[in-house]
Image (cartoon, rainbow, N blue to C red):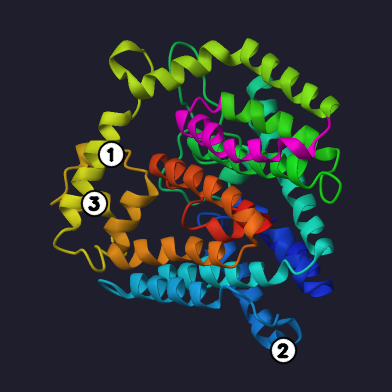
Amino acid sequence: MQYLFLLVFLYFLLKDFRKGVVIYAPFKFFFYEGFKLGPTSFDIALSTIVCAIFFIKKRKLIIENFPWKKSFGILLISGVIFSFYPSFYIGEFLRQVFCIYGYGFVFFYSLSDKSITNTFLKSCTLFAILLAGNGFFQLVTDQNLLGNFHDSFYNAEFTDNSLVRFGNFSRIRSFCSHSISYGVECVVFLITFLYMYFGYKKEYFAKSMYFAIFFCAIGIITSGSRTPLLGVAIMILPLMTKLNRISGRQKLIVILAITCFCALFGSYVIEMINSIINPDKTSVEGSNTTGRLEQFAYSIYLVKNNWLLGYGNVNIMDMKSFDYGILYGAESIWMVTILQKGIIGILAYAYFYVDVFKHLPKKSKIFFCLFCIGVAVDRQCNEFDGYKYVFANNDNVIII
């Protein structure tokens, strides 16, 4: 079956390379590292093919004055160092060079006009409905059809299939390995579609996105995770600057939607947020503000002897010199990056956003700054889609 999927994406690539690249982009969430394809992973195989085709056809595809060549060059160097340090690991090298920075570079190049962007958004809509629609089906029937199908091809180190947050509340994960990942994926797509609605309704918004928005909003709640709740609350704030672009009738619809949401899920959201601030006064388990600060301080302590390059491509949780009890659940992208890639990794990651800011039109810079504040805070709570998949999946940055 996985070879049939490969043939489908190859068909799109050969028919129209740019459109094929952007069609696959959201599906990276499904075909990530553990999805097997013979001796390698599906994503490594297809990303390598994409990069090879781009190299062969680059004279026809190159865009003059592409603004982020330096950013990708810096990130690529950081990724190559990571794959060689402290010892060379071919799998990590292929992921860093082809799956992350190679594919990300080609993806950004491919978003060259309105037609390509529309194709990308249609692919995002389809994927989001599959993702969150399957989660909704799991909620209603307790049957995870796409999740079971995905797991049959997935070589995972950790997959949590029986998650309970508190009481009898079972957490939904759809076809993700963890409910937190599911919730954060729903945030990525929900925010993307809301940006289209508020900022580019005439140009890019399609009616099918209403269904995706509905299912993603339900997915954020039923994931039973505080990370997506916190992320969506912060990342939605920049949209307030776009309210003047929608009509009074549309504003009324938004107000009614928010009112209904608060009526249905308000007490649940309040309890989840309260568990972050006052963990001793709630039954919700998991990390909290105090725990995250302790983990961050411990990460700084650990990296002080390896501050330049970090500890490299080793499994940090397996290192006997580390206190696993403190680091358990240390999912912040900043902690993970500084431990694995040191200061070089942090600076390379941050420079990309600085470079994007430098090349934005003035009218978009305030919006982008607000968005980045949301990203920064959200990444403090999770590592998902923050580093390995930021270029192929975090489409919000490029569409701004």
- Magenta segment range? 222-247
For mark 3, what is the residue? 318
Q: Secondary structure at mark 3?
A: helix
Q: Residues within 10 Å of mark 1 (few under 14, many from 20)?
A: few
Tell me the element at label 1. loop
The residue positioned 46% from the left and 39% from the top of the image is: 159
Amino acid type, label 3 = Asp
Residue 65 position, x and y percent, is: 65, 81
Question: Which label was assigned to residue 59?
Answer: 2
> Tags 2 and 3 in contact by the CB under 8 Å rule?
no
Work out how far the residue at label 2 is from the one at label 3, CA to CA, in angstroms. 46 Å
Q: Residue at x 34, y 57 (%)?
A: 337
- Helix, strand or loop for the magenta stretch, by majority: helix
Specify the quadrant of the image occupied by residue 215. top right
In this picture, residue 224 sits left or right of residue 289: right
Q: Which residue type does callout 1 highlight?
A: Tyr
Name the residue at 72% across, 35% down. Answer: 243
The picture places residue 87, in percent across and down from the top left corner, at 27, 73
First in sequence: mark 2 vs mark 3: 2
Q: Nearer the viewer, residue 351 or 88?
A: 351
The foreground one among 186 and 67 is 67
Label 2 SS: helix
Q: N-terminal of the two: label 3 or label 1?
A: 3
